[in-house]
Each structure stands twice: as structure tokens, then as C-alpha cells.
Amino acid sequence: MHLERSRTLLQEALEVIPGGVNSPVRAFRAVGGTPPFIERGQGAYLYDVDGNRYLDCIGSWGPLIFGHAHPRVLAAIRDQLEHGTTFGAPTVLEVRLAQEIVEAVPSIEKVRLVSSGTEATMSAIRVARGFTGRNRIVKFEGNYHGHADFLLAKAGSGVATLGLPECAGVPPNVTADTLTLPYNDTKAVRELFAAEGDTIACVILEPVVGNMGCVPPQPGFLETLREVTARHGSVLIFDEVMTGFRLAYGGAQERFGVTPDMTALGKILGGGLPLGAYGGRAEIMDTVAPAGPVYQAGTLSGNPVAVTAGRTLLGLLRENRATVYARLESMGRQIAEGLYAAAAQAGVPVTVNQVGSMVTVFFTEHGPVTDYASARTSSTAQFARWFHAMLEQGIYWPPSQFEAAFLSAVMTDADVEHLLAAAHTAFARCAEERATS
Ligand SMILES: *Cc1c(COP(=O)(O)O)cnc(C)c1O
């Protein structure tokens, strides 16, 4: 595989951009080597500046559930561009999107649009604190909720990938009110709430984690959180930036039948453009300015181009709702089973976690991965070998053990076969290196 032009571009990038990238995991630090510089995307494929083609198992880290450059999305964006790109004044488009979100997501009665997932979770927590008059928040180890200061305690995603224990530049007093518990630890949740539940403004979590690799909630975990937060008047926030419109049209809350008080959205919501949202019970959302005293604003919030892209993608999902989620689930399962079988045949111990179109192969021999501690038993060195063997065969898997792969609805049976054949070879290569090392 030639990466000459990417290598040159990386050198240029390193001169003017920290680490050469605008978001850390893109730099391939955890797996080594040169990240391909991407020239274009079409359907399920990415094309780099050196002429390599890859099956895209990242989908821009979540948004592209119908692949790259979907003709309907492009046409809608083009049409909107003719009418202007931003107004800083109300539009009919944002009202329609808000109605569609309220219709889709069980917990949301009112919603505010922002420009990223980071803004969505950060603002939701401000609102939860304003609504309850309490300061303390609870999050879970290995969950990632964007890069707001007070959420960078024991965070997942790039923070986990780089193995950062804490983030420089975040003063200790800023995270002093952030309590962190192990994911899926129902007992720890009950104990904390029994002791100090009435001081807790909110609990925020990924209802299915993607940001320490894919880790599903164990039976009863979401229900316990619902029960104890309700009992103590704390706001339960599902961060569905990743899972929203992906695990079901109404997100993980529809899939698992547990309704939080508030929900953060992003990724798929923007159809590939920058857009996020947070919403919840009307009583809570009416504390947001100008309706209430919690200030939150944005120059480009509800941007008409992003809203148009998002509405078009949501429309595609609604039209295909009867089939698309079932297809993503069966494709996810087929890939998970195929990866298991290929690893077993090569004699490489792994745990594969999969929920719908989210998949992670953990290179661990220590059994199920249910939280951050068990995720961290994985061999990142073996993952890196496997990752590069996949990349060389034209499969672009996320370049970190602690990120979930995302399947898209435009992947074909032939794509799945290609992926599994490549995985077979990649696991065999891992086994050879295990034997010689
Ligand atoms: C990606 C992500 C975020 C942050 O969204 P950005 O748009 O990158 O700011 C927050 N929460 C979860 C669960 C995410 O996956």
C-alpha cells in the first residue's frame, strides 16, 4: 500500500497543526504509522490522496449511517445553499427538525439545537444543575461526553486511546463535583445514591458505550439508574450523541425501553454537518434562556444547511425504518460472529461486543468486557497489528482499541464478505507474531 502523498501531507500538517490533526484519534498514535489523507468518500468507501480505496467502518465516527455523499442529502444541501447559509434568526427548518426530534425520541418534549455533541452534553448538564439547584454530577469511567472541562475525568475515546489519566489544563476544582463510577456497577450506583443522592444534580451516561469500544449495558443497569435518580430528584441524562438514530430511530432509549429525563444528540442528527441537540421534559427545558434563567446560545445554532442535511438523513431513516435497523442488526451480528470465528481459527483470544451497527473486537483473554477496567485488559499492541493488516487489505477500522466500528446501511453482502476475509488474514498475522514474539 502506497501512502507517499499522505506521508508528505502529514509532515506539512505537523508544522502547522498540533499532532497534524484536528481531533486526536485521527493521528494513528495508538496504532502507529501514517494516517491516510482522505480525498473523497462515496457510499461505503473512502478514497485517499494516494489512490487507495477503503471500506469505511468509521463513517466519520458515527454520522454517516447511509454512507458518504448520499445523493438525497447532497441535493438537499445544494438546494439550501442557494437560499443562504446562515441567518441568526428563526427559520421554519429548525421548527420542523425540533418537531421531528420530539416525535422520534421518547424523552424529548422540548429541544434546543447546538453545533456539536460537546455543546449538547455540556449544556444539558448546565440545565440539569440549574433545574435542580445542585452541583454534583455522576459519570462513568470510560464514557466520553465531549471535551467540556468538567467531563474530562476518566473519560473514554481519545482520552482513553492516549492513556491520559487526566487532562492538563483542567483545574482540580473544576472536576471536584464530577463523581465517577465503574460502568454497569449497579451496586456502586445504589450505594452512592443511598449516601448522597439528594446532592446529585444529574447522572450522565452512554446508554450503550461506544467510547471505550462497544460496551452494552447489563440487564437492569439502565433500569436501576432510572429508579434511583427518580427517587432522589436527580436528572437522568442519556448521552445519545452516538446511539441516537443508530440503535433504533428513537435511540437506545427506544431500544431498551428506559426513558431518561434529558437526552443529548449529535452525529447522525447533522447528516454529516456540524449539529447537536439537547432536550428533555418541558418542565426542565423551560429553564433555558430566554424562557428561563439558564443561559445557552450559539451564533450558528440551528444552522439551516446543517439542519437541512440532518432532516434529509432522518427522512431517509424514517422511510426505511421497517428494514434498515433490522438489516444493520443482522449485519452487525454476522460480522461479530465472523470475527469471533476467524479469531478462534487463528488461535487469537478475543471478546467481540456488538449492539446493532456498533462493533468492537477486544484483544483480551480475560473474558467479557463490561466496563473500562475489563476493556483495558486488551492488548493494544495486538490490536495495532490487526488494525494495520486490515488497513492494508482495504478495511478502514477505527485506529484505536477503545473506539467502536460503525457499520452503514450502504454496505453490501460483498462488503461484509470482504471484511471477514480480511479479518481472517489479519488474525492469522497476529497469531504468527504471537508465536514468534
Ligand atoms: C462524539 C461524542 C460526543 C462529542 O460530540 P462532538 O460532536 O465530537 O463534540 C459526546 N458524546 C458521545 C457519546 C460521543 O460519541
Image: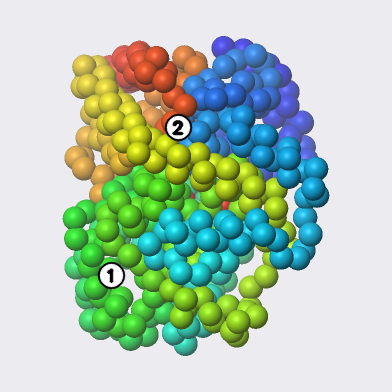
Q: Is residue 87 left or right of residue 149?
A: right
> Is 369 above or below relative to 257?
above
Q: Is residue 238 left or right of residue 58?
A: left
Give residue 160's position: percent from left, percent from top.
Answer: 45, 49
Using a 10 Å C-alpha cutoff, classify the residue at mark 1 as few (fewer than 14 neighbours), some (14 to 19) or many (20 or more). many
Assign a secondary structure to mark 1.
helix
The colouring scheme, among rainbow, by chain, secondary structure or one colour, is: rainbow
Task: Return the residue nearer the eye: 297 or 61.
Answer: 297
Task: Return the residue nearer the eye: 129 or 285.
Answer: 285
Res 408 label: 2
Q: Which residue is mark 1?
A: 226
Callouts 2 and 1 close, C-beta under 8 Å: no
Please count the marks in the image: 2
Distance CA(mark 2)–CA(mark 1): 31 Å
Q: Does the beta carbon at disc 2 come under 8 Å from ligand 1? A: no
Q: Is residue 40 left or right of residue 384?
A: right
Give residue 48's position: percent from left, percent from top.
Answer: 64, 21
